[in-house]
Image (cartoon, rainbow, N blue to C red):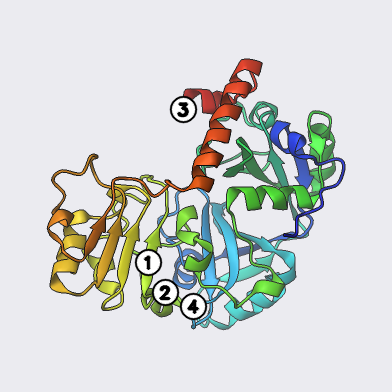
Amino acid sequence: MNSIALPRSCPQDVLKSGYVVLLKQTGLLSAEGDDAVRFVHGQLSNDIEHLGPGSVRVAAYCTPQGRMLALFHIWKSGGKVCMMLPRDILPALQKRLQIYILRAKVKLADESDSMAILGIGGRKAETVLSEWFPGLSLALFGKTENETGVLMRVKDAFGAPRYLLAVPSCKLQEMESALSAKLAVCDESGWLLGDIEAGMPQITLPVQDRFIPQMVNLEETGGLSFKKGCYPGQEVIARSDYLSVNTPLTPETRGMFGAKEFAAMKQGAVFINIARGPVADARALAAALKSGHLGGAGIDVYDSEPCTDSPLRECENAVLTPHTSTFTGETRLLMARAAAQNVLDWERGALSPRARAA
């Protein structure tokens, strides 16, 4: 198995402790205008219309065949919809999106030269960043901004938080100097390793047009909305034979699957939920199973556990297991190692405040 060769400045203990990296290969595309939000919402796999000012979301841009051409981190700032993506695919994506603007009041702009993206992670990250963002306490995919820039919490890696910081290029040198005085400096391979550890996919030029969102577990990052209207590739995604849900339970994912979503699935498709029970409406799922619209279901999680009164118990085409989907040798070994590492970190006083609170 091939592995990523990290530079000497980025061993794993540095990635756990605290580091900063300039993401030179990351670009920024913005959409501005009266119709910007509606336009972007209609092109991507996630709900952009209801994206709040304190949040960032992941979303895919797909071909009509449902294969991903890009994967964005998206937020709203200063009347713009900002989309972060790899630089190597940005020009072609901008040109492709421009074709569909037609008469909509939208202006697309490549802001990669005017804005710089920094990746910051490790146990020290929150304390260091609090100097510029006082009282910092962001939940996953939370966002805050001030005169310094836009700060976003993305998926953790190696048991420590990670952040993306978008700053004006004119402030980059000053910001890099201040952060590098308190954190180790890594190159982009360190950030990439964190993405792999976090299960965060990237769509770059060599892998464009090869994967549909479910193949990279995009629903686990909240990158798919099953409640929004049409977007390119949605029909293919809706024709999947198997749909497996692996997303965490958040206010956004609670009730993600209901009668409307099950009706939109392919006739005879199989629904699998190993995430959390309230992500799916059990009564609506039972109705879809009993009517024969869905061919089957594999359910490992429930609204209340143990499962004693779920309507799914009455469905002959549903396989119910008692929250045991992690019962594999590899998973149990990883969980044991993580628990042991938390104990060691606790004894050293190195466990983050957020982890201690949890």
**Residue 325 place in picture, x, y as percent:** 39, 50
Kind of residue indicated by mark 4: Gly
Kind of residue indicated by mark 2: Ile
Q: Report the side of 290 relative to 248 (left or right).
A: left
Residue 25, compared with residue 210, is above or below; it is: above
Nearer-N-terminus badge (1/4): 4
**Residue 273 place in picture, x, y as percent:** 34, 56
Residue 146, compared with residue 344, is above or below; it is: below
Nearer-N-terminus badge (1/2): 2
Nearer-N-terminus badge (2/3): 2
Q: Secondary structure at mark 2?
A: helix
Nearer-N-terminus badge (2/4): 4
Q: Report the side of 160 relative to 9 (left or right).
A: left
**Residue 324 place in picture, x, y as percent:** 36, 46
Q: Which residue is mark 3?
A: 358
Contact check, label 2 and label 4, Cβ < 8 Å? yes
Q: Which mark is residue 237?
A: 2
Contact check, label 1 and label 3, Cβ < 8 Å? no
Give neighbour class at mark 2: few <14, some 14-19, many 20+ (Cα, 10 Å).
some
The label nearer to you, 1 versus 2, is: 1
Q: CA distance from mark 2 to mark 3?
A: 35 Å
Q: Which mark is residue 66?
A: 4
**Residue 75 place in picture, x, y as percent:** 55, 53
Q: CA distance from mark 2 to mark 4?
A: 6 Å
Is residue 135 among the parts visible in the rendering?
no
Frontmost residue, 284 versus 72: 284
Quadrant of the rendered image containing residue 113: bottom right
